Amino acid sequence: MSEGIGKQHNHMMQGAIILSVAAFITKVLSAVYKVPFQNLTGDEGFYVYQQVYPLYGIAVAFALNGFPLFVSKLIAEEKALEEQQAITKLVSIWLAIGSISLFLLFFFGAAWVAEHMGDPELLPVIRSVSYVYLFVPFLSSIRGYFQGNLDMIPTGISQVGEQVARIGILLAVAYLFTVRDWTVYQMGTYAIASSWIAGFVGSAILLWYTIKKVKWQPSKLSKSQKGQFWKIGKRLVVEGLPLTAMSSMMVLFQLMDSFTVYNGLVTAGVSDTLAMSLKGIYDRGQPFVQLGLVVGLGISTSALPLLRKYRQEKKSVEWENTTFSVLNLTVLFSGAASIGLIAVMPWINQALFSDRTGTAVLQVYVISIFVASLISSTHAILQSDTEKWLPAIALFVGLIFKATVNERAVEYAGIMGSSYLTILALLLVLVVMNIQMPKTVWLRFIENGRIIKIIALLLIMGIFTYVCMIGLDGLMPTDSRMSSFLLTIVGTIIGGIIFIAGLIRFDLLSEQEWRYIPFKKVTDKLRKNDQE
């Protein structure tokens, strides 16, 4: 019996690793492609794509994160193959109802959406993205079915396959834009079509795995199985939607920006063309945030199973210690990511986007990495304690605040106003979520002056890195993108060395937490030398 459980555990861990690697590859690709895309299409072309991108991002959250996880939970609750397949069919019906409704909304309501985004010419781009919702039911239900049976390979392969296909088409369209006489809106329509073509590729991969691995029973649904239809629908709303909402948090904030930033700039008297360019410059921050969030999301995702285990076993001391470790690691590493990016932003902005326009705006915007990572970790902690609705309520409050105030902030302060509002809205989400967090966990940051040490370390790292970059910049013979790229690498290395040295000097990590750090042999040697 124990041998069987051990094999199942190993299989589950292997599956988790496969999904984590696939998610990491996908996130890196999703962030990196935006740089050559912006370089080829310019800030105006980037604006057109980014205005509609959140509608695609929501579909991805449905088909990749929220609903497959919900379906896998339902499947795992059933042992009989017939019952699992019946559940999959019932969930697919609910997902089809919702997805087709969203397709119709965005296809026939494209004019309304474009008008409220302030740019009626976005209509064909919005209609182009609406088709991706037709693939959500199949992608979600089949991924959930496989994951519920602890087979993560189909999800991982289809996830990477989708992204590779989408990025290939996007960059091909961006290149053709440079040699064809297309408008930015024609380019945007073709570029965003990559979303549903990628959905087709992902569906084809999953269909192949389904034919190869699953023996579908052609039997009709029994009366008792049909009776579960409304019960599953209720669980989909109560459990699935909050999970999906949190997994698409930053995309939803981007959606608020799509409806408010351009409109706010135009209302302030900025010309349409300049407003498009400014919104494109503001959207340069998205790749930085996407990459920065990878670390925070990795910490929270890996900690969730252990937190749930301790809660179920009522080991409150172990649960609180693990909770503190998760928050401590998140504060340190997401804080370092935000401060490090602020320090090197003038150079990385020029290296990636050919100029330093909007550097100050981006420096403020990347602070969202720190706050959003803390939200992700807090969400994982609350999930382990079976709290489902508070995170969704907190997110709703933050989105309402952002949607209500953002346009006015842009009118008064330009795109900088939107950067500040994003941080404030995320802080509001974090504060509301912490209503249910044990206060003793946060109080531990005050013990032994820990929070002062953390702030001191991050400030020293940021200031010293920036000063070194300024000095090295003065020694460079040219002010080219390549020199900025080299300086960015040097600055990153300098910041990383200071950060690791500070962790050792201030004793900010426990022995257990040091095991999460890459290059363990190197860090162990440095710690040993420091103790001597």
Image (cartoon, rainbow, N blue to C red):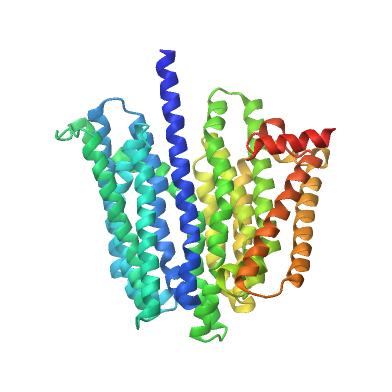
Decide if residue 311 is on the left or right side of residue 226: right
Decide if residue 285 is on the left or right side of residue 243: right
Q: Is residue 528 above or below residue 341?
A: above
Decide if residue 122 is on the left or right side of residue 212: right
Extreme-front residue of the structure: 477
Q: Is residue 305 above or below residue 495?
A: above
Residue at x 36%, y 60% (from the top left corner):
166
Extreme-left residue of the structure: 219
Residue at x 43%, y 30% (from the top left corner):
12
Residue at x 57%, y 60% (from the top left corner):
288
> Residue 456 in the image: x percent, y percent?
80, 51
Q: Is residue 226 above or below residue 363?
A: above
The mark tally for this picture is 0
Residue 443: quadrant of the picture? top right
- In the picture, the quarter occupied by the N terminus is top left
> Residue 260 in the image: x percent, y percent?
51, 72
> Residue 488 in the image: x percent, y percent?
66, 62
Residue 519 seen in this snapshot: yes
